[in-house]
Image (cartoon, rainbow, N blue to C red):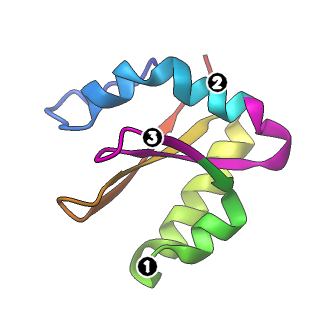
Amino acid sequence: MKRSTGKSDPYEKMLRKHWDAITAMYLAYEDREPMIELDVVSGQILAYPAKDYLEDITERTRDLAKEQYHKAVAEGALMVFVRDKAKRVLRSYVFPPT
């Protein structure tokens, strides 16, 4: 993982810890245009069809997330969502290609 926010991010350490599994999951489903999600509570890494995933998030964040996703794909970047159900957080991260 190459991206660092430069500020304290409670999920960055968890993303680093699971980075190899996140990228492996993405590569396993790359031909299906996956959206990868790291579930903080369960520790699971999940792959969903990006189109369906983006339609299922709240309307408040949907348009921005879609825009970020299409830009990430065009640049060859990887977009990952972190879901923390305990804190009711859903946060996206975009990582440039290595």
Q: Return the residue found at the far left.
A: 8
Amino acid at circle 1: Thr
**Residue 29 picture location, percent across and down:** 77, 39
Marks 2/1: CA–CA distance: 27 Å
Q: In terms of depth relative to the viewer, which is nearer, 8 or 32?
A: 32
Query: Quick check: 53 left or right of 33?
Result: left
- Part of the protein shown in magenta: 28-46
**Residue at 26% from the left image edge and 25% from the top image edge:** 13
Q: Return the residue found at the far bottom.
A: 59
Q: For the residues carrying marks 3 and 2, which lies nearer the camera in this image?
A: 3
User: Which residue lies under the disc numbered 3?
Assistant: 44
Crowding around mark 1 (Cα neighbors within 10 Å: few <14, some 14 to 19, many 20+) is few
The correct choice, above or below, for 26 with respect to 90 in the image is above
Amino acid at circle 2: Ala
User: Which residue lies under the disc numbered 1?
Assistant: 58
Q: Return the residue found at the far front.
A: 42
Amino acid at circle 3: Gln
Marks 3/1: CA–CA distance: 21 Å
User: Which residue lies under the disc numbered 2?
Assistant: 24
Quarter of the image where one finds residue 97: top right
Q: In terms of depth relative to the viewer, which is nearer, 6 or 11?
A: 11
Query: Quick check: 6 left or right of 63?
Result: left
Crowding around mark 2 (Cα neighbors within 10 Å: few <14, some 14 to 19, many 20+) is few
The correct choice, above or below, for 52 with respect to 16 in the image is below
**Residue 31 picture location, percent across and down:** 86, 41
Marks 3/2: CA–CA distance: 13 Å
**Residue at 13% from the left image edge and 33% from the top image edge:** 8
Q: Which of marks 3 and 2 is nearer the N terminus?
A: 2
**Residue at 56% from the left image edge and 45% from the top image edge:** 46
Q: For the residues carrying marks 2 and 1, which lies nearer the camera in this image?
A: 2
Query: Quick check: 82 left or right of 35?
Result: left
Q: Which of marks 3 and 1 is nearer the N terminus?
A: 3
